[in-house]
Amino acid sequence: MARLRVHGEVVPDLSVWEGMAVDLAALHNGGLVTACSDEFYSSPNNVIAPGLARHQAEGWETARRRDGGNDWLVVRLGVPGTVRVAELDTTNLVHNSPAAAALSGLDARVSAPDDPSAWFELLPRTRLQPDTPHRFRLPAPRPATHVRLDIYPDGGLARLRLHGDLDHGSPPA
C-alpha cells in the first residue's frame, strides 16, 4: 500500500473513566483549541499536550499586548462534561506569565459558541503567580462542551488541565 488517507475526526472512548475524574481538555482525550487571540510564539494546542512542559516554548506563549485587551483561547472539550477542578500551570514562565486568568464555559448542545450571552463563569478573574502550578476547585460547575481561558493582559501557560466528570449527552458540536 502506497498511501492511506482516513478522513474524519477521532472520537475517544472515555467509558473506562466512568465514575472517575478525567482531563476533559487533554489533547489525548480529544480536546482541541478551536480559537485563540495570539499564537505568536507557539501553538495554543501546546497548552493541552500530554506531560509537563520542559521549557516555556512547550506551552502557549503570546506576544506583549499594546492595547487594553487581553489574550484568550477556546478549548473544545474531548467529550461534554462538568469541569470541577481547573489547573492553570505557569511553570517555566518566570517573566511572561499572566497576572490573572478566568474561565468561562459553554454547552454547544444548547447554545451557539458565537453567542456571547451563552457563556457562563466557571472561574472568576483570579490572580496567578509566575512559575507555579495553580489548582482551583470550581465554585459552580456546570456541563460544558467548550471552555474559554482568558489571561490578563497577556503572557502564557505551560499547561491547562480541566478535570471533571463525563456528561452522557450528545457529542460536542
Image (cartoon, rainbow, N blue to C red):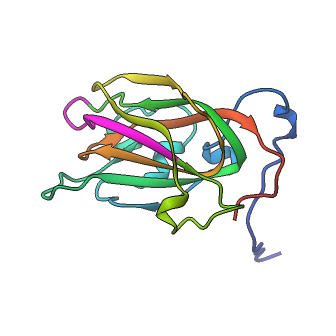
Quadrant of the rendering where the N terminus is positioned = bottom right
Residue 137 place in picture, x, y as percent: 54, 23
- Which residue is drawn at the image coordinates 18% and 55% (left, top)? 65
Q: Residue 95 lies in magenta, yes or no?
A: yes
Residue 7 place in picture, x, y as percent: 75, 74
Magenta region, residue range: 94-104
Is any part of residue 74 visible from this angle?
yes
> Looking at the picture, does residue 68 appear above or below residue 95?
below
Q: Is residue 37 left or right of residue 5?
A: left
Is any part of residue 42 visible from this angle?
no
Q: Is residue 129 left or right of residue 148?
A: left
> Looking at the picture, does residue 83 appear above or below residue 33?
above
Where is residue 91, by image quadrant? top left
Q: In this orientation, which residue lies closer to the viewer: 22 or 169?
A: 169
Where is residue 26, by image quadrant? top right
Residue 3 place in picture, x, y as percent: 76, 76
- Which residue is drawn at the image coordinates 18% and 51% (left, top)? 64
How many numbered marks are there?
A: 0
Which residue is outermost to the left? Answer: 66
Q: Residue 65 lies in magenta, yes or no?
A: no
- Which residue is drawn at the image coordinates 86% and 34% (left, top)? 16
Quadrant of the rendering where the C terminus is positioned = bottom right
Residue 138 place in picture, x, y as percent: 54, 29
> Looking at the picture, does residue 126 appear above or below residue 15?
above
Where is residue 59, by image quadrant? top left
- Which residue is drawn at the image coordinates 75% and 75% (left, top)? 5
Q: Is residue 4 left or right of residue 159?
A: right
